[in-house]
Amino acid sequence: MKGAYVIILWLASAKDVTVGKLGTIAFAPGFYAYVGSAMGAAGFKRVERHLDVSAGRLKTQKWHVDYLLAVSEVFETIEIATQERIECSIARNLGESSSLACIGGFGSSDCRCYSHLFYSHRFNDLEDAVNRLFYSPCPEILGALSKEGCDGREIVRKRYFINTMNRDCVLNRST
């Protein structure tokens, strides 16, 4: 299955992280939403790969988000099944949210978006911005979901318990 995804991360404390060619970025503690594409041959297996990086099972840092995943906890993943490339529409819409900050150039080296990573100190602000995308989506996203006949069942949300003893404990939720 292919589509787009949003990974919500939690960073417990401030960290300076060297992110490939972007250089060192000072990440503030709080919540981050990363928007990615699952349009390649592996589809949503890319999300599983990101979870492996976050859990320390995979050390390879291939994408910008891998560097942040290595020092943060995955809080939630949202997978949107579609044949349309909507990740840039999702990123643009999150970037327009006044309650979120953009991390310039992050995750967007292969497109013209300003960023694919967004930050808020408050989880509720981040969650509200993400929920607005899917419950009152912009025309681009709504059009792509409509073409797929999506009535909400193709958006799969998985919330992860932040737990240092078992980082893979998951609660599945489909919307």
Image: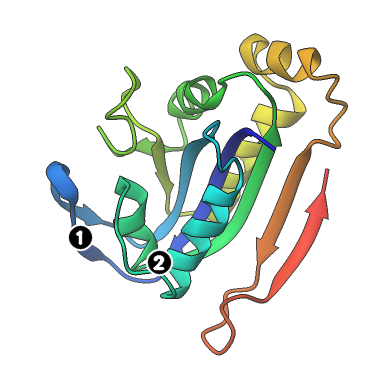
Which image quarter: residue 44?
Answer: top right
Q: Nearer the viewer, residue 34 or 121?
A: 34
Decide: marks 1, 2 in contact (CB < 8 A)?
no
> Which residue in the structure is indicated by mark 1?
17
Q: Amino acid at mark 2?
A: Ser
Position in image of residue 28 (x %, y %): 30, 58
Q: Is residue 81 left or right of residue 35?
A: right
Position in image of residue 37 (x %, y %): 51, 34
Position in image of residue 29 (x %, y %): 35, 62
Q: Amino acid at mark 1?
A: Val
Q: Is residue 15 left or right of residue 34?
A: left
Q: Taking 157 as reference, is 82 above or below it?
A: above
Which image quarter: residue 41?
Answer: top right
Q: Residue at x 51, y 85 (%)?
A: 164
Q: Which mark is residue 175?
A: none
Q: Earlier in the sequence, mark 1 or mark 2?
A: 1
Q: Real-space Cα distance between discs 1 and 2?
A: 11 Å
Q: Residue at x 40, y 46 (%)?
A: 119
Quarter of the image with the C terminus is: top right
Q: Is residue 110 left or right of residue 145?
A: left
> Which residue in the structure is indicated by mark 2?
72
Q: Nearer the viewer, residue 139 or 14?
A: 139
Q: Of helix, strand and loop, which one carries label 2?
A: loop
Q: Residue at x 65, y 28 (%)?
A: 133
